Amino acid sequence: MPENTPELRPTHPLALAPVVAPAASVDGFAKQFLQNLNFDQGVTLSNSDVNDQYLALAYTVRDYLMARWFDDRAQQKAQQNKTVCYLSAEYLLGRQLDNNLLAARLTDIATEALAQCGIDIDDLRAVEIEPGLGNGGLGRLAACFVDSLATMSIPAIGYGIRYEYGIFRQAFADGQQIEQPDAWLRMGSPWDFAHPEAAQTISFAGTTETYDDGGVERTRWAPEWNVLAVPYNMMVPGYHNGRVNTLRLWRAVATNAFDLHTFNSGDYVESVRAQTFAENISKVLYPEDSTPQGKELRLQQQYFFVAASIADFIDNVLPDDFDIEKLPERVIFQLNDTHPVIGVPELMRVLVDEKKLEWDAAWAITQKCFAYTCHTLLPEALEVWSVDLLGRLLPRHLEIIYRINDEFLLEVRERFGDDEMLIRNMSIIGEHPYRSVRMAYLATVAGSKVNGVAELHSQLLRDNVLKDFAKMWPDKFTNVTNGVTPRRFLRLANPDLSALITEALGAGWTVDLERLRGLEALADDGDFRERFAAVKAANKRRFARVLEARGDQPLDDGHMLDVMIKRLHEYKRQTLKVLHIVSTYEGIVSGRLDVDTVQPRTFLFGAKAAPGYGMAKRIIHLINAVGEVVSGDERVQGKLKVLYPANYNVTLAEGIIPAADLSEQISLAGKEASGTGNMKLALNGALTIGTDDGANVEIRKLVGDDNFFLFGMSEPEVEALWAEGYRPADVYQGDERLRSAIDLIASGAFSDGDRTVFEPLVSNLLYEDRFMALADFASYLDAQERVDAAYADQDAWVRSAILNVARSGYFSSDRAMRDYLDRIWHATPVS
């Protein structure tokens, strides 16, 4: 620093001056935009390109949020309110520009200011690259929750990983999925701030040793290697309340990134080996883990971000003189699924080894500082780590887990006696098929509360998945049904419907979604139904333009838009949907169905399959193959069409959901935890065809049986059929429609006559069918016939669609946050 440049010490007038946001006027916004274009992008308006303009716009919006963000952080530091620390491996945020404009009341101002500069804001919207930091519902839920916490003025920090490459970019080659890198950072990221000065050192491997600490025997960890976790802060603005919370994502950086001596010796690759090794940790979301190296990298990722987050909160958020024994008064760490559960032994290590607390005191604190949300009912999705891997990578943590388990099993014996099988079943350490740590069990033992994410899911957790723990601690288990933010999934995604609702009910529904109940009376108003139908038609036209811009097939006028948009997994039963399409197609071409009686439909899929999930990839191939044949067959022209736009993400969802007529929620009963796509679609006026699974149960109860197409077995019926011996081949033999559909697939009709292409999928259905697509097929087709009949009466259909919107207010993420606050977190707003 030059000698004559003043350092901004805390006593300097500029350091003491409050940060003031730019004036919220059209002229002020335009001035700030042009300054950012000149001084941040280094260009004038006349020689700027659209990316320069987008970045300058983003910086301008960011400037308006900054003062509020600084003020909120100062308030929170002064008030010392309890903070919700949301630990999640995923945040599927969607594009940030429009959300931040909406929250800060800047949409109209920005639009007019840019118009004065000769710029169409829609051109800049199209430039933004969505950060693919999540895989599906888990990440989208986390994004909804941090939005609601900011809107409710609850002090909260979302902690996660700043993946360099997020969820892969999906493309199709000959109908098969191929994965491409999701380089979301290639054009810069204007919404986050790096803080390398606040980096945390995260250690791995090594050994442990005991030592004497003034007469007390203690343990210390001597790690073998470490990396730096560099925080990147993103602002999370509340809706129209001036509140701005923080999302803090960690990037891995080598502690010694470059070896100059090795470089000078000519070994250029080895000179940056440490940097490459370290950066792998935050390189990609969910690295393929079918190899030992992939499994180790996943565990590295999980420990990396929770250790950094816990250290950050203790070192940087709490005051220097904080009494660590009062930690539960200041924080609740919410474990969003099992990915962050390694945080339990990490907090114990910090309290016992670093803060020198006694074990019992540290454990009492830890049990009050964590709560666990379980997001699955599938046993294979309840994460386990081999003892060998965990002991090699995190030796001190394995020791702590062993002690937690030993003391827990003593409690089990005191409560239930020496029931050896029960003890084996409840042990955090699993013995079969290999010695492992069961992370869901660790989270349940350590958490102050355990919650499911829908009424049925929470009941099945208590009754089946974690039944022994629920018997031991019945008060520990609760339910919080998921929710979605109406700001993104109604205000932003469906502006025409939002305007119609606001005209009818006033503006308050955006933060009080139960006010949508006021639309019920308007469902019987012919004029309102007509305007509602016009909105749906306009949304279809808008989505058709989106497809056209992407180079996808067009959307046919007059078609019902039948959508299935969710992660590709066998339990979600995209296969059942394909069987319905093939059956309808086969019925028309064979003459079994009168083509004139078939309701024109466009079937639309949006889904990615995990790179290592072979069966899911075969299903994608089948969908695309069926779509190519059906959409190209003149015999069904004007009646059936199949669309599968590649790379389904939040941005594409915001086009699909407002346009959808029918929402496919067809998982096998007892397998879906909740779902959130079902909520978004109902909220936007799509009728649901679904099983009684996950949050479908609550949707059906709220919207009414007349406005929901129920089919399929109940969860008890599913269990009974498994118990008596389910034989899918018998179902196939007994149903002519099913047999014709499967035989058509097996014949090679959708694979240029090659019968081998889909043989693994056909055999899986006939001889395994783990998720009972064949068992529910007949019921599903019957329900689809009811759908056709209902859609033929457009006036009645629109009435049902309005009632779906009116009765979906319960599914706001704001309500979900209130439930968490009341039942689990007990945090209060910043005043």
Image (tube, rainbow, N blue to C red):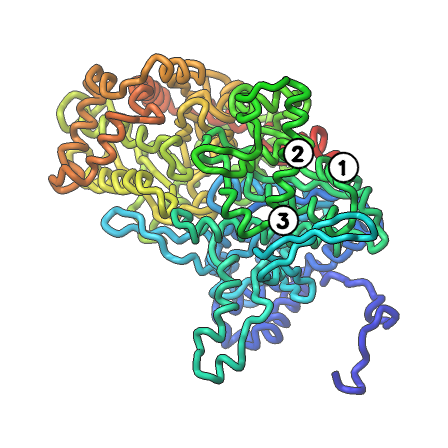
In this rendering, the answer to whether 650 lies above or below 530 is below
Which comes sooner in the sequence, label 3 or label 1?
1
Horizontal side of 110 relative to 821 (left or right) equals left
| Count of numbered tags | 3
Which comes sooner in the sequence, label 2 or label 1?
1
On the image, the x and y values in percent for residue 356 come to 78, 49
Where residue 194 sits, quadrant-wise, is bottom right
- List the residue tagged with mark 3: 396
Give the residue at x 48% y 59%.
283
In this rendering, the answer to whether 186 lies above or below 684 is below
Dot 1 falls on a residue whose secondary structure is: helix
Q: Which one is nearer the viewer's eye here, 520 or 91?
A: 91
Circle nearer the viewer, 3 or 2: 3
Which comes sooner in the sequence, label 3 or label 2?
3
Work out which residue is located at the far right of the displayed protein and give it. 11
On the image, the x and y values in percent for residue 626 come to 23, 38
- List the residue tagged with mark 1: 360
Give the residue at x 33% y 39%.
616
Q: Which mark is residue 199?
A: none
Which image quarter is the N terminus in? bottom right
Q: Which one is nearer the viewer's eye here, 673 or 709?
A: 673
Q: CA distance from mark 3 to mark 1?
A: 17 Å
Work out which residue is located at the far bottom of the displayed protein and give it. 3
Amino acid type of the residue tagged 2 in the rendering: Gly
Q: CA distance from mark 2 to mark 1?
A: 15 Å
- List the residue tagged with mark 2: 447
In this rendering, the answer to whether 799 lies above or below 443 is above
